Amino acid sequence: MTSVRVRRFGDAALLVELPDLAAVRRVDDALRAARATSPTDPPPLTGPSDEPSSRSRAFLVKSCRGTHDLASDARPGARAATERAVWAGVEDQVPAAESVLLRVRAGTDLRALARAVRQVAADALDSDDAPATDRPLVVLPVTYDGPDLDDVAAATGLTVDALVARHAAATYTVAFGGFMPGFAYLVGLDPALVVPRLATPRPRVPAGAVAIADRFTAVYPAATPGGWRLLGSCPTSLFDVARDEPALLTPGTRVRFEVAG
Amino acid sequence: MTARAVAVVDPGLLTLVQDLGRPGWAHVGVGRAGAADAAALRRANRAVGNDDGAAGLEVLLGGLRVRALAAVDVALAGAYVAVTVERAGGAVERDGARRVRLGAGDVLALGRPERGLRTYVAFAGGLAVEPVLGSRASDRLGGIGPAPVAAGDVLPVGPPPPGPPPAGLPPTWPADEPDAPADDQRDVPVLRVEIGPHAHWFTPRWPGVLCAPEGYVVAPSSDRVAVRLDGPQIPRTAQALGRELAPVGLVPGAVQVPPDGRPVVFGVDHPVTGGYPVLAVVRSSDLDLLAQVRPGDVVRLALALSTGR
């Protein structure tokens, strides 16, 4: 079974550390599914830890060396019910480049949650299933008129037409969010289009700017300072608090760009 | 009868509508926000019979003046300020009350705190501004929720809570509460921290630096996003020099150390992900203390071992 490192991140969160984005995608999906199918009862409010002191001490010693992976101390059966219920204590699940953060309600049993998370994550990584392809596909129209087209073409040795064709040919996946509401880091960029960020960020990138940087592409949901290279613009609203699902691009969503006009 | 509402006469330096925050949206880049000193908002809410999560005002360094457009019970908690009530009839009352009944036309005015940073004002029934994604919290980093309150704003107040007004709550700010009046004898605030997920990026002597008895000075650039600390730099290990961390999800209280070695303690408006190693994490129970430290204050950090839960 694949071993997954689950660390405490303070007293109200766990950090699941993973080798790469593909693993993050699998584990993030699996954790979300586990939460969705868990009982909706409120999480158990635990009293003082019932761990034997020797175990606690071993944990603390490891902590002082900076390798405080929560000890794997599963007790078969006795805690199965608790482990199912702890999912309800998770309030936020934040995938990132090499990790998934689970932020929990006060009083949630972090040890029980860590055991449950480790199991779900290991199962997800061991599974032979191909990554999910039944995720929603969002097609975004893009006018390729960005100010950095010529520079990116020069840096990649492509013509502007070839650059645009390659950017619009791929099917991308939302790896994670962050940076600003509705912003989605899309993976699946043609390796020929990998370029570094601008040395000096622009003071203002307009809303709807379609950009690339490193191995990612993205659409800026709102105007902000930014250092990515701008290829074009997209009129689609990516974030609107009036919608039931305010963000159009949630982790796992597939995205294609379509040359407009 | 006039609708229940209060009109802002003067917002002071910065006054925000806050509740207990907006969980559940971090994966799409929306942080939780909410009252920086959540315990103080809860105390103020309870003093007027509200649910803990009712929206109130978070007032930075006092100075707020609001006029009641209809009678309303008000309570304060957090950084202690003198309270003045200018009655509609012209009389002026000054005292250290934490619970006040305002009549229509009365103006509540907050003085300046001598210590602490944020005072919370709860109105019986809670502020009924339009919620956004399930919360009335003002998130200044993400720009979600109500804008900072401005002079002339009229803030609707919900129907008064059912049942009699809460009895037995002390009408004045008790001296033994965290929001007690200034006390020169009080010690330097101590933030208890757990070892963070990236502590191995730093030389093993980091606890002696981060938790030195001299402490750190709160930098002027501190705000709801982060409290920045001036003091000894935390050195990285040789292997971690020049290394970059892949973006990682954050929590309030995360102590991030950028390459310059100066620790930054994230607050309630923290970005949902960050790109520098997290050396330590402040205990949840000490985040309220963090919300009340001022630029120039000295704070100490102390290593608290995990309780194993």
Image (cartoon, helix red, strand yellow):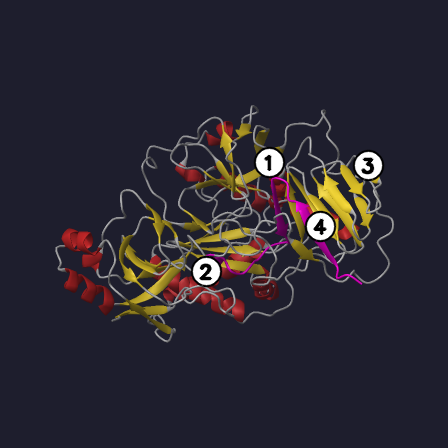
Mark in the foreground, 3 or 2: 3
The earlier-in-sequence mark between 1 and 4 is 4
- Residue pointed to by mark 3: B95
* B186 part of magenta stretch: no
Q: Which residue is drawn at 41% across and 37% down?
A: B258
Q: Does residue A52 appear left or right of residue B31 in this picture?
A: right
Respond whether the residues carrying marks 1 and 3 are from the same subunit: yes
Dot 4 surroundings within 10 Å: few (below 14), some, or many (20 or more)? many
Residue B42 bears which disc, if any? Answer: 4
Q: Give the range drawn in magenta.
A: B1-29
Q: Which residue is drawn at 48% across and 66% down?
A: A246
Residue type at tag 2: Val
Mark in the foreground, 1 or 4: 4
Residue type at tag 3: Asp
- Residue pointed to by mark 1: B191
Residue type at tag 1: Leu
- The x, y position of residue B307, in whole percent, is 60, 45
> Could you tell me if the residues under marks 4 and 2 are in contact, i.e. CB atoms within 8 Å?
no
- Residue pointed to by mark 2: B28
> Could you tell me if the residues under marks 2 and 1 are in contact, i.e. CB atoms within 8 Å?
no
The earlier-in-sequence mark between 1 and 3 is 3
With respect to residue A37, does B308 lie above or below? above
Residue A167, quarter of picture = bottom left
The earlier-in-sequence mark between 4 and 2 is 2
Residue type at tag 4: Arg
The earlier-in-sequence mark between 2 and 1 is 2
Dot 2 surroundings within 10 Å: few (below 14), some, or many (20 or more)? many
| Mark 4 vs mark 2, CA separation in Å | 28 Å
| Mark 3 vs mark 2, CA separation in Å | 46 Å
Provide the secondary structure element on which disc 2 rests: helix
